[in-house]
Image (cartoon, rainbow, N blue to C red):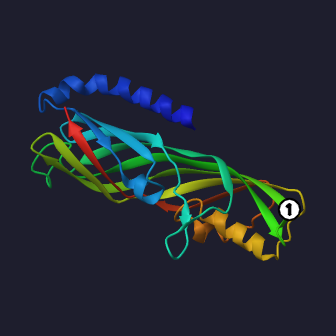
Amino acid sequence: MKYVLIFLVSIFFSFTDLFAQDSLAHSNKLNTIRWNPTPMALIGPKSIVFGYERVLFPNQSVSFNIGTLVKKPFTDKYGREFHFFDEHNTGGFLGSLDYRFYFKNRNKRLAPDGVYWGPYFSYYDLWFQGTTEILKNGATVNTIKVDAKLEMISAGLQLGYQFVIKDRFTIDMVLMGPSYSYYIASIGLDAEVELDKDSDFYKDLQDYLERITPGLSSILEKQELTSTGKLKFSYYGFRYLVQFGYRF
């Protein structure tokens, strides 16, 4: 899916050149580069996502976002970090592509200023690997390795508003973005001693895996967690974000 997104972005750049001359008759600033801090708040402060928007027509544009995701450590009720696993490989990827229609009658200025709507496509990938030990009377009685990966492919419609400040700076807000999403969850467990599914440890493990991706616990709790294999299911999703940009 990463390569498909890169291919679509390449097509996007080729496509914009065909319409640049028409847009130049209305604006001398067709490009906006953006920083999307939303994943930093939802996923983790080390997540970095940037975007680019290109005006094609006076009231239409196309844009994409791409970046890396790093989930933040979980905390207890006192705000202290705790690590259920000794994680040695964690990361993620986010890519999205959308086409925007700015309302002609509602907006006083041309794109990319004002209220807009349009279709979007996004791909989300988060993974981690780790190891944990079960202790009894100070001795290790079991060692468990986990290899988890979650992918989310979404297509939907969004409604947003973009402020243009002093013709250079932008604040872009997607206010509503319902989607139909397809999830692929791969969870592999390798334990030296077979896990008891009725044990407290197994329940804590299931809760931990559900919390890997924010907002999905209510979905994953309806799925059966197996010791290995994949879960594939469809569900309704939602997109919202705030990002800051610079026009040129």
- Which residue of the protein is positioned furthest toward the right in this rendering? 193
Q: Is residue 29 above or below residue 220?
A: above
The residue that appears at 55% across and 36% down in the rendered structure is 2
Closer-to-camera residue (39/82): 82
Q: Is residue 111 toward the left or the right of residue 63 in the image? A: left
The residue that appears at 34% across and 49% down in the rendered structure is 118
SS at circle 1: strand
Closer-to-camera residue (197/141): 141
Q: Quadrant of residue 96?
A: top left
Q: Residues within 10 Å of mark 1 (few under 14, many from 20)?
A: some
Q: Is residue 121 visible?
A: yes
Q: Is residue 6 above or below residue 125?
A: above
Report the quarter where the C terminus lies: top left
Q: Is residue 212 toward the left or the right of residue 21 in the image? A: right
Residue 174 % position (x, y): 32, 56
Number of callouts: 1
The residue that appears at 46% across and 32% down in the rendered structure is 8
Circle 1 residue: 142
Residue 151 % position (x, y): 60, 50
Type of the residue with mark 1: Asn
